[in-house]
Image (cartoon, helix red, strand yellow):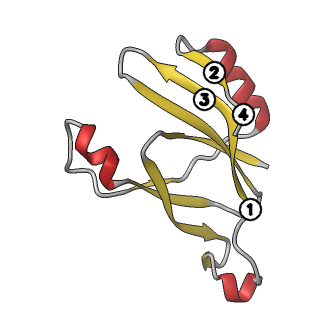
Amino acid sequence: MKYFFLSEGWAIGQIWTVGGIWNETAWRRAPDIKKMSISLWDKDKNEQMWLHQVEDAVLMLEIYPTIEAQKYTSNQNIGNVVLTRLIDAEQVLEYLSNTSAICQTNQI
């Protein structure tokens, strides 16, 4: 499995695999992406970032701010971002142990 953090108010758009953009017809299913019950709260940026788990076949993800998130951000010029560096479980634990943000767990 691979992991990534996604700020509250951002959504997942297109998803890439080895053969290009994920094709639900070819794969006969949607990609396995789960929002975990762990988040980081960065009080300096006033931002909550949720940990997400994604299957190994996924290489990259497009993310974009929702309309609701754009209301509260100072920089509304960001249309989308492509995450190309997904992390493994060991890297997640290392990041969580070294971050100055507050780690929260919630029941989803």
Q: CA distance from mark 3 to mark 2?
A: 5 Å
Residue occupying the point 52% across, 33% down: 49
Q: CA distance from mark 4 to mark 2?
A: 10 Å
Front position among marks 4 and 2? 4
Which residue is disc 1 drawn over? 32
Which residue is disc 2 drawn over? 104
Taking 80 as reference, is 8 left or right?
A: right
Residue 91 in the image, given as x and y percentages of width and height? 71, 30
- Mark 1 or mark 2, which is nearer the start of the sequence? 1
Residue occupying the point 71% across, 21% down: 94
- Mark 1 or mark 4, which is nearer the start of the sequence? 1
Taking 7 as reference, is 25 left or right?
A: right
- Viewer-side residue, 27 vs 9: 9
Check if mark 3's residue and mark 2's residue have beta carbons within 8 Å. yes
Q: CA distance from mark 1 to mark 3?
A: 19 Å
Where disc 1 sits, the SS reads loop
Q: CA distance from mark 4 to mark 1?
A: 19 Å
Which residue is disc 4 drawn over? 107
